Every structure is written in structure tokens, then in C-alpha cells.
Image (cartoon, grey):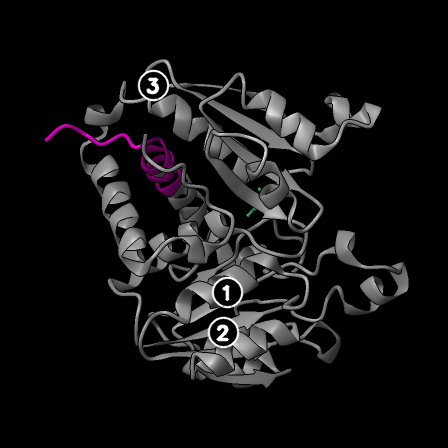
Amino acid sequence: MSEIRNLINITDFTVEEIDELIDVANDIVENHSEYEDICNHKKLGTLFFEPSTRTRLSFEAAMLELGGSVLGFSEAGSSSAAKGESVSDTIQTVGCYVDIIAMRHPKEGAPIVGAKRTTVPIINAGDGGHFHPTQTLTDLLTISRKKGRLNNMTIGLCGDLKFGRTVHSLIEAMLRYEGIKFVLISPEELQVPDYVKASMDKAGAEWVEVESLEDAMPELDILYMTRIQRERFFNEEDYVRLKDSYILDLDKLSNAKEDLTIMHPLPRVNEISTEVDDDPRACYFFQALCGKHIRMALILKLLGIKREA
Ligand code: CP
């Protein structure tokens, strides 16, 4: 029997495996009909203990487009977690019903606990302020499609870099590519955690912390905006003080590169003005579409299913 693979952190996959996932995602778009029944009789469990639009629905759309089916819950309150059931008991139970599980949980490390209690593959769909590896796969596919490469570029990450799990995972992933410079744009209180800085130093990456988005703009190839996340703050006063630290509008883009790629994992609140949506450099809804394609490729990989040649 082959070894069960999980995706808890983006570094669970090698760069070569990520390249393969990107190739499969592109093949899915080019040869969609070849994949329509490929997951016939397979079931995906979506266990979302935290709210989600894109991650949950793109996973569900991905499995349905592959010919499989989906069951699960979209809030802890509609599961037996509301009666005090532990995460590990929930996972062990759902593992009896499905072939693969995507789970989101507010507690960091919950998917690791879950993975120990089941023999079906577990996908971390976001654990607290920790990691969000399928968002990172989405981001890598988006960058690859927009830039035609994953190396040699300057990436600006802006907003809540402290609690932003998408930022932590993206940095981890991009550290493995040549010639990446990170420009970390945030208020002092929301700078990336020390363990992320240590990873960048260990990898010998070039990085700088700044507070001004306008000053950083001209050198950026990618601008990755993030939401200041109300749900991660311990007190409302701090949130209110910091929530509008960065609002990207057309005026701020006036000194940006013409081929800048503007990304955002979404949801957004105020941090990108809607007037930017029609700018050809705005890629965040394209990014949401990429999320479905890469999750289709991921489900196939973890189930060990390949398109017949
Ligand atoms: N990007 C992302 O994780 O969005 P959702 O919270 O809507 O899933």
C-alpha cells in the first residue's frame, strides 16, 4: 500500500511536486473533459470549523468537476464540536465516510492532530494564524500564469503580516526559488513573526521591512495585499487603530510597474479600493479561479489518480 500523503504545510511538497501540480492544473484547463469523471465514486469531506467562501467552495467545486461528491459542514456549530467533541474524534469519524478531507480550524496545529487519527489524506485549509498551504498553491499557480516564472522577482507583502497565514506560507514557498526579494510592508505592530524572519535569514533571502506602500511601489513585480483581520486581534481598539493602515487605490498605483501583478487572497474589506478592480494589473479574482484549478490537481495527487495518457 502506498504511503498516505497529507498537506499540512507547503513544505510538505518539494518544488518538483509543486511544478507537477501546476502542470496538472494547466492541463485541467486545456483538457477539461478528460477529467470530468476521474474521481467517480470518490468523496471529499469539507470540515470547516471557521468561516470560508473561496477555500471551501473551490474545494467543493473542484471535487464536483472531477466527478466526485462532497459532504461536510461549514461551521463548527452545525457539527458535534458544538457538543464538545474533540477535533481528533471528529476526524477519525469522518475518515470512515470519505476518501479525503479538507479542514479549516482556528487552532494552529489542529490538522496535524487530525492527520494522526485517520488513514485518509488530510488537507490543511487554514489553521489559525499559522499556515494556509492551498492558498499558497493558488498563489504560485497565479504567479506562474501571470509572470511565466516563479523566480527572479520582487514581492511586496502588505498589511497584516503578523497574523496573515497566507503571507507566512507564501514566504516559505518562495524561499525555495532563486532571486526572490521580499518587501514587507506593515505597521510595526503587524510585522512578520520572528520565526518567519529566521526562515528568510536561514535561506539567505533578501528582505526588508518598510511602512510606506507608496515608497515601496516602484520596485515591485508582485503586490500581495492582505486584510487586517479583526478576528485575530485581542482588543477592538488596536483593530480600529490599524484597520485602514493601507488602502490601495489608483492614485497609489501611479508609480507602479506596468506589469505589476496585484494579488489578494480575499476576502477584502477596505484595503483595495473597488476602483482598482478594473485595472488590468488586478488579479485577485483570477487568483480565486486559479484556486479551483490547483485544488483539482491537489485532490488528484493526494488520491493517487492520474489522467490516462
Ligand atoms: N482566501 C481564503 O482563504 O478565503 P476564504 O476565507 O473565503 O476561504
Identify residue for label 1.
224
Image: 122 above or below 182: above
Location of residue 88 in the rendering, given as x and y in whole percent from the top left corner? 67, 33
Residue 146, numbered label: none
- Mark 3 vs ligand 1: CB below 8 Å: no
Quadrant of the displayed image that contains ligand 1: top right
Identify residue for label 2.
156
- Mark 2 vs ligand 1: CB below 8 Å: no
Q: Are marks 1 and 2 in contact (CB under 8 Å)?
A: yes
Tell which of 189 and 117 is nearer to you: 117
Choose top left, top right, bottom left or bottom right for residue 113. Answer: top right
Helix or strand or loop: what does disc 2 sit on?
Answer: strand
Identify residue for label 3.
67
Answer whether residue 301 is magenta in the image: yes
Location of residue 70 in the rendering, given as x and y in whole percent from the top left corner? 49, 20
Helix or strand or loop: what does disc 3 sit on?
Answer: loop
Answer whether residue 250 is magenta in the image: no
